[in-house]
Image: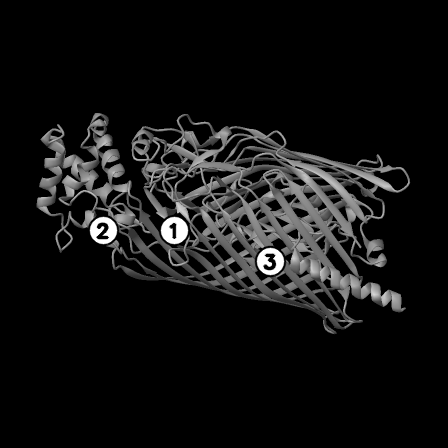
Amino acid sequence: MACSNLKHTGLAIAVVAALSGIPAIPAAHAQQAATPAAQEEEPVTLSTMVVTAQKREQALQEVPITVNVLSEQLLQDTGVRDIKDMQVLVPGLTVTSTQSAAQTVARIRGIGTVGDNPGLESSVGIVIDGVYRPRNSVGFTDLGELERIEVLKGPQGTVFGKNTSAGVISVVTRRPSYTQSAEGEVTVGNYGALGLAGAYNDALGEHSAMRIYAALRTRDGVDDVRTGGGPRTETDDGDQNMQTLRGQLLWEPADSVEVNFAADYTSREENCCVTVTTVRGPTAAILNALTPGGEAVIPVADPDRRLAYSNRSTEQDIKDKGVQAEVNWTTPWANEAVLTSITAWRDWQAINGLDFDYSAADVLYRAPDEDESLTAFETFSQEFRLTGSSETIDWMVGLFYSNEDLDRNETYRYGAAYEPYLSTALIGQINPALALRPDAPLFLSQATGRPFGTLFPGLATLDTYKQNAESTAIFTNNTWHATDAFDVTLGLRYTNEKKTLESNYTNPNGSLACASYFLPNGQVNPAALQRIGAALVSRGVPAAAVPTIAPQVIGFTCLPWANVAHNGRSTEQERSEKEWSGTLKLSYNFSADVMAYGSYARGYKAGGFNLDRVQSSNGLSSGTQGIIPVDDTSFPGEFVDSYELGTKTTWADGNLLLNAALFYQEYTDFQLNSFLGTSFVVRSIPEVTSKGVDAEMLWNTGIDGLSLQAGVVYADTQYGDDPLPDAGLVLLPGSQMSFAPKWSTNANLTYEWGIGANLVGRFNIGAKYMSEYNTGSDLDPEKLQDAYTLVNARIGIGDQGQRWSLELWGQNLTDETYKQVGIDAPIQTGSWNAFLGAPRLYGMTLRVRY
């Protein structure tokens, strides 16, 4: 007894010391911490796989929803740590990032929300252990010890809440058990990758247990960077430095009550993200001339080199923390109905430096400082559900409340090259030959009448946004077992949403260049027009052309960050929405192995506000390009009517699942976030449709240890034919939607075999193919991504008792270079850049377990 207690105490001390000294990565096996009884309850066939797609435990084959279920073993075999890793396992799922990890966006069947506007919620909801997260970027962190991930396709707002008009990614992590266990992991890889992980689980008595998990990941950058004259010193980008800590306490004071407390903290202090040039335009020569060393842009566009140019910091600092409590009480009422309460508080913030011109020239940037570049969410949420069953009805009613405070600080700073670059680029647009004249950099100085070097000093903008979003909902989801074979599911949700926004705009440097054009009453100064005309005529521009060109000169001088009309503005906006959403599903079991269903769902995503400087020709968001500030930056809610006809079939004594569905989704007022070259503005697209087929296979082949998972999605996702007012969106009507490949397929093969009496080998190889698609919201041909395939593989050896294993792994084994998002190079007409996906990564992982 004494020896056993000493061993118990020593292990606990060792694990706690290890976790405090070297944080760790996720633990390995789903059944490792489980009791022998729990192991006996594990599904012995695929047909009994359990999901919670309708917030009650059901067999996957009984749920009339398209659900891709990723088990813990599959997630481990494929190295999934975050939502971007998992896209290789789910056909029809695309996850991209742009300016930082905070700008991470998921899309399902081609439907999603372009990032870079924190005021815009995602169409694909992220739910972690029952708690809705306000933005997709929270899923781009170490998700920890995963039990499973469920990807629900199509509108899921009835039970999962607002803003899930395209689907839900539901993450379920491992919970405490009453068995003592400790797990550790060490990973090393290319680009200097190092991962350390640890988890410890133990009982704290007869009625409580705890689990603690910690992780540390570091890696060098995957993109090389030329820094020009600096001040940036980092010569790579896309590195990793992430720490995660998660603790849970399970308390079961009675057989009928279970309470799980959880707290977590994640920190990311990295450099992200640069772009590579995909099309080198005429402005590159101007930038080169203004850069020490004479090279601001790559001489020949070559994305495969992964060579970026940036003279300013892309440092990012992301902090995510929160606490939550889930209570499940089996009541003595209504046939032992279960009352569930989930209370959560989350605090998430991101600080991110940005080299806005994506070149080594010192043109325009944002400093990585909280006062200048902050996006922060503080969210409180509360959900109550009462779930029960009778002989003929499975029912659920619930209440949901959330209160979200969003704070954003946004700035732009001028570099020394901004004035000569803008002058030269502008005069070059009027006549390319004029950009070659030695006096080209002086053009705006002459047009404004100000001394050269004084037009655009220092801090251009300092804007703050404070948004509050309060959401209250009541919902119900009920299944009537009309006969032994026929079920009817009816769900309904009523949402009351209120948002308020306070915006304050300042130009600390006074916008001297733009101000020089206007009289105190805001009218254009005739003297300014004379100066502009004189500067143009002196360069050989015909006087008759001056009235046409002068507005263009004023517009370029008064870009949003330089526009004096914004200085000192304050606006208050408010919008309220009261909307119904819901679903009707009919399912019929032709036999124990064949179920067919048809469903209709009405989805809703709340409207909101653009959190950016918006200006147009008429002061309206719908206006064309101009310099009149827009006060009303709101956009309406998004709605979808979705129809699905599917079947779920079981074969080979429950070891082969073949599921397929036809779908048709029609969106109205689709929220498209467009980059206008100077700011992000949400445009409501009247109609978007997505139709196609979604199929999946799960197969335990009958060959001992060999299993296969595969899927295919064909999605014809198109914008409606209605013409749009923006000249930049002229290509959209009738076209395939951006980020929407027509074909998306994947396959994963796993084989496990014995080696001698005590060892076991395991091999996994997986691939995902996507046909060509456009990576820009405006469908510029230069942003097209050709069809490509990603291949991952992992092979390992370990002892049969799962005490240890050693694995070799690789991701993107063919080193495919592909665009995540293509962009117009800011203020560089004729140039295009792209944020690239990760290159080939490989390494080795050692896992140990007690």
Tell me, for residue 511, which label it has, or none: 2
N-terminal of the pair, mark 2 or mark 3, is 3
| Mark 2 or 3, closer to the camera | 2
The span from disc 2 to disc 3 (Cα, nearest Å) is 50 Å
N-terminal of the pair, mark 3 or mark 1, is 3
Type of residue at label 2? Ser
* Residue 707 visible from this viewpoint: no
Q: What residue lies at 41% left-to-right and 30% top-to-bottom? A: 298
N-terminal of the pair, mark 1 or mark 2, is 1
Would you name the residue on which mark 3 appears?
159
Q: What residue lies at 89% left-to-right and 37% top-to-bottom? A: 756
* Residue 460 visible from this viewpoint: yes
Horizontal and vertical percent position of residue 379: 51, 63
Q: Quadrant of the N terminus?
A: bottom right
Q: What residue lies at 82% left-to-right and 58% top-to-bottom? A: 35
Type of residue at label 1? Ala
Would you name the residue on which mark 1 appears?
367
* Disc 1, SS: loop
Task: Using residue 32 as the reference point, say whether residue 490 is left or right of it.
Answer: left
Tell me if mark 2 has few (under 14), some (14-19) or many (20+) residues whose alpha carbon lies within 10 angstroms of its own.
Answer: many
